Image (cartoon, helix red, strand yellow):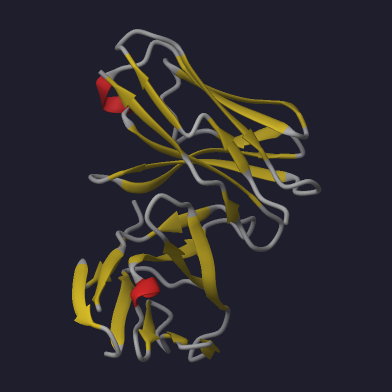
């Protein structure tokens, strides 16, 4: 049963630490998205890739966030340094047609 | 920027009742999507609408693409406890799955 896999599921860290979240998209999907979900802002698009190339990362704070796809089976979202306001659930999604979401990485920055 | 307003924000209903929620925008869209997010999970696509006036069903769920292309409705008939979750409307910003999500309607079903 194909699914988007995200790690870690939960992460608690201290302000200033580096955080890396990983995503394995569904095999064959060439479009990968990173979303962030908070109570206040809802679901926000941070960045997306097609064929591993970044197409749009305008939703992402550039000074501390970076997103990459080192290969077709791995997408990463890095925050350095992390801040308490980065606390959220981060979702990866992939799809050609219908969008499939992972279970999310819940980040808490103390 | 774009805003998709969903109402109501939250609903508490008795099992077996029908549910109706809607999504409105100030802009015209060509696609409306309805997603459901179970607690602790990512959103899952329920229904996609591609034409003004289109009415589409998926089991107990029925969604309609408003004739003005600025709104959409989702109805759930005979609710059951597993209908609990957050329901989002969304539109495809670029035609490439670049989705913009509404504010969500949180549904609680009381057994």
Answer above or below: position of A47 versus B8: above
Q: Return the residue found at the far right.
A: A28
Residue B38 showing in the rendered view: yes
Residue A98 picture location, percent across and down: 64, 63
Residue B31 picture location, percent across and down: 53, 72
Indicate the quadrant containing the C terminus of chain B: top left, top right, bottom left or bottom right: bottom left
Q: Nearer the viewer, residue B65 or A77?
A: A77
Q: Left or right: B40 with respect to B30?
A: left
Answer above or below: position of B20 versus B29: below
Q: Identify the residue at image location x=38%, y=82%.
A: B74
Residue A20 picture location, percent across and down: 52, 20
Answer above or below: position of B86 versus A85: below
Q: Identify the residue at image location x=48%, y=91%.
A: B53
Asked where in the image residue B26 lies, by quadrant, the reply is bottom left
How many numbered discs sit on the rendered protein? 0
Q: Return the residue found at the far front.
A: B111
Q: Identify the residue at image location x=31%, y=73%.
A: B24
Answer above or below: position of A27 versus B86: above
Residue B54 picture location, percent across and down: 52, 90
Q: Return the residue found at the far top.
A: A16
Q: Nearer the viewer, residue A59 or A21?
A: A21
Residue B31 showing in the rendered view: no
């Amino acid at each position: 049963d194909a699914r988007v896999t995200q790690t870690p599921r939960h992460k608690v860290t201290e302000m200033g630490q580096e955080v890396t979240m990983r995503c394995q998209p569904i095999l064959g999907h060439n479009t990968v998205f990173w979303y962030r979900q908070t109570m206040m802002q809802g679901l926000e698009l941070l960045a997306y890739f097609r064929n591993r190339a970044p197409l749009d990362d305008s939703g992402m704070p550039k000074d501390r966030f970076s997103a990459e796809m080192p290969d077709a089976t791995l997408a990463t979202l890095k925050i350095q340094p992390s801040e308490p306001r980065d606390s959220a659930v981060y979702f990866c999604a992939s799809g050609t047609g219908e969008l499939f979401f992972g279970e999310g990485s819940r980040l808490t920055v103390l | 920027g774009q805003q998709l307003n969903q109402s109501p924000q939250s609903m508490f209903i008795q099992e077996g009742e029908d549910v109706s929620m809607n999504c409105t925008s100030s802009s015209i869209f060509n696609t409306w999507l309805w997603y459901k997010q179970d607690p602790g999970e990512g959103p899952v696509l329920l229904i996609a609408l591609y034409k003004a006036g289109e009415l589409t069903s998926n089991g107990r769920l029925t969604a309609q693409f408003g004739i003005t292309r600025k709104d959409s409705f989702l109805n759930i008939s005979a609710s059951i406890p597993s209908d609990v979750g957050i329901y989002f409307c969304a539109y495809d910003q670029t035609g490439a799955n670049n989705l913009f999500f509404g504010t969500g309607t949180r549904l609680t079903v009381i057994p």
